């Protein structure tokens, strides 16, 4: 979603989803859907549909599959439905070394060397995460095309050490949706527009749009996104996924094209809580190049699977955002049903307003991100040199190539960032103080109400792709408080509105990932709302 609009509206929880839901009528058989708009033939079935990491490991253990075979199948699937067929356009680049990596993992397995649960598992990563290989790292920007990072980001080093196969990189909202206030999510000048696999004329949200679409459409086993405010949890919600935005610092950010040193983090995007938990633990660890990771000492875990407990909601006290109990009746209906499910699973529910106490902190966020974006991008380009030397170069490139780089929206956000000074300026330090106050405020709310977590609707159903007007709000956002505080946030499927997924969010205090995984897993196992996309062309009228 458009980041500036998102930041402005993310705290206005309970907004009405004003566009009436169109009515869809379709009949389903094995090969095609019939909509009032005409017939559409979706993709054929895929033998790895909805397969989990443990399932893949079992197949490799028994010899039914090898990592090389699994990687081949995913690459074939990308060719069939991402580059052809419905043309999701979620994968921006294939790793030319993927099959070789898979072969080496198979060889290690034959020799009795297993690196862990990610050994031989194909992963797609967002194209703002540096890889020191033959792939580019561009943040989706045409200005960065051809940029090859000199080394892996810290989390990519961890990913390789864990034995994962890096299948390729995914498209994103350009510059993680920090280029324009009138942008269209999931569009980049390098990768163009990504589609939502549930209904193809819908926006998969951003900025981790390509990862969301890819994982949902079974183009990989698991994926990695990044978030400043909503960019993991929103595309996860809209694409029917489990997304975890970790505590800032739990995963290192070094080697990732930044927006904000205060709020940025990468995180897992998966089809199950278990798979997300496996990936989360594999990439934790302290990094001397990211000072924020020092705070995770004695807090991070390398294995979060012991917290996958079906009774994980029993005895938990959860604060529900009561302002989200009104609005679009279909979305609110899903939320109320989820609340009842949690009660049935032994949770105590308290309706509270945790948005109003944060009002004074909200205005500072955009300014903080603008200051930190300029500072962070300039530092990144210095560390990983290429044809673009700094933010000024990027702005000039876009001006010189406006027909290709800016055909639908401009770069006023980049220009606004460039006009700012350094991080010593009073405007920045005062704004940062407001943003950081969210930590104390949220902690006090949870302490006063003896809460284990806060809970809300992650986002509304996917809006239509609109390259003329840009993004429009679909109501119900829960990303802001945890994003500004740097606290962990997990989303998972809560149901669907006319075939469009809607997610439920749980968030809590710093380094409470284990507790959130307990609650999310309990809800997931009791509800089982995840379902594969049907690649419907559009909702008919």
Image (cartoon, rainbow, N blue to C red):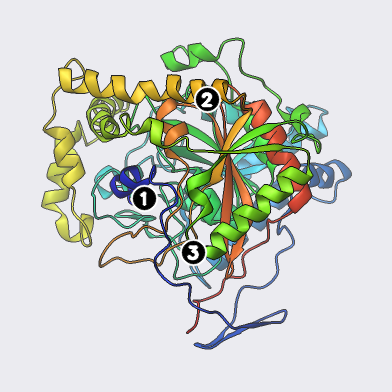
Q: Say if residue 130 shows up in the picture.
A: no
Q: Say if residue 87 shows up in the picture.
A: yes
Q: CA distance from mark 2 to mark 3?
A: 29 Å
Q: Position of residue 281 (x, y in %)?
A: 65, 27
In the shown orientation, is residue 261 left or right of residue 328? left
Considering depth in this image, is 458 or 90 the residue closer to the camera? Answer: 458
What label does residue 173 carry, if any? 1
Q: Earlier in the sequence, mark 2 or mark 3?
A: 3
Badges 2 and 3: C-beta atoms under 8 Å apart?
no
Residue positioned 56% across, 64% down in the render: 330
| SS for callout 3 | loop
Considering depth in this image, is 349 or 65 the residue closer to the camera? Answer: 349
Residue highlighted by disc 2: 251
Q: Position of residue 42 (x, y in %)?
A: 60, 76
Q: Is residue 469 above or below residue 337?
A: below
Mark 3 Cα within 10 Å, few/some/many (few <14, many 20+)? many
Q: Nearer the viewer, mark 2 or mark 3?
A: 2
Residue highlighted by disc 3: 88
In the shown orientation, is residue 314 left or right of residue 163? right
């Amino acid at each position: 979603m458009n980041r500036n609009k998102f930041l402005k509206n993310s705290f206005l929880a309970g907004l009405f989803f004003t566009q009436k839901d169109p009515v869809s009528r379709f009949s389903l058989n094995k090969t095609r859907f019939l909509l009032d708009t005409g017939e559409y033939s979706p993709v054929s079935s895929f033998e790895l549909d909805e397969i989990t990491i443990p399932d893949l490991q079992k197949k490799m253990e028994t010899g039914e599959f090898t990592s090389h075979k699994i990687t081949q199948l995913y690459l074939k699937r990308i060719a069939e439905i991402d580059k052809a067929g419905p043309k999701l356009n979620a994968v921006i680049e294939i790793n030319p070394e993927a099959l070789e990596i898979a072969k080496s993992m198979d060889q290690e397995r034959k020799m009795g060397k297993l690196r862990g649960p990610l050994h031989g598992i194909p992963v797609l990563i967002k194209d703002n995460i540096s890889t020191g290989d033959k792939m580019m790292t561009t943040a989706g920007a045409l200005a960065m095309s051809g940029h090859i990072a000199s080394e892996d980001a810290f989390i990519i080093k961890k990913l390789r050490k864990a034995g994962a196969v890096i299948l390729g990189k995914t498209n994103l909202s350009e510059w993680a949706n920090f280029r324009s206030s009138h942008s269209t999510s999931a569009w980049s000048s390098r990768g163009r527009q990504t589609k939502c696999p549930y209904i193809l004329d819908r926006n998969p949200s951003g900025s981790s749009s390509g990862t969301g679409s890819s994982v949902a459409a079974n183009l990989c086993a698991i994926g990695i996104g990044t978030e400043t405010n909503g960019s993991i949890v929103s595309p996860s919600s809209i694409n029917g996924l489990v997304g975890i935005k970790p505590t800032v610092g739990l995963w290192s950010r070094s080697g990732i094209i930044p927006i904000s040193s205060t709020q940025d983090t990468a995180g897992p995007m998966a089809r199950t809580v278990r798979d997300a938990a496996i990936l989360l633990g594999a990439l934790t660890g302290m990094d001397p190049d990211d000072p924020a990771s020092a705070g995770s000492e004695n807090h991070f875990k390398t294995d979060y699977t012991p917290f996958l407990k079906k009774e994980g909601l029993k005895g938990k006290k959860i604060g529900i955002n009561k302002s989200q109990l009104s609005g679009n009746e279909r979305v609110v209906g899903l939320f109320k049903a989820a609340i009842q499910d949690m009660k049935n699973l032994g949770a105590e529910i308290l309706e509270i307003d945790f948005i109003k106490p944060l009002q004074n902190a909200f205005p500072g966020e955009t300014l903080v991100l603008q200051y930190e974006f300029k500072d962070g991008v300039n530092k990144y380009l210095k560390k990983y040199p290429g044809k673009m030397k700094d933010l000024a170069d990027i702005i000039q490139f876009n001006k010189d190539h406006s027909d290709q780089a800016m055909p639908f929206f401009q770069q006023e956000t980049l220009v606004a960032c460039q006009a700012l000074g350094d991080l010593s300026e009073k405007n920045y330090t005062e704004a940062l103080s407001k943003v950081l106050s969210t930590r104390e405020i949220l902690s006090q709310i949870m302490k006063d109400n003896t809460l284990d977590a806060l809970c809300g609707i992650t986002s509304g159903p996917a809006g239509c792709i609109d390259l003329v007007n840009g993004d429009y709000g679909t109501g119900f956002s829960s990303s802001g408080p945890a994003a500004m505080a740097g606290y962990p946030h997990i989303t998972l499927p809560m149901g669907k509105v006319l075939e469009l997924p809607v997610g439920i969010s749980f968030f809590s205090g710093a380094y409470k990932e284990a507790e959130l995984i307990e609650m999310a897993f309990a809800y997931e196992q009791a509800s089982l709302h995840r379902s594969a996309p049907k690649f419907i062309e559009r909702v008919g009228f």
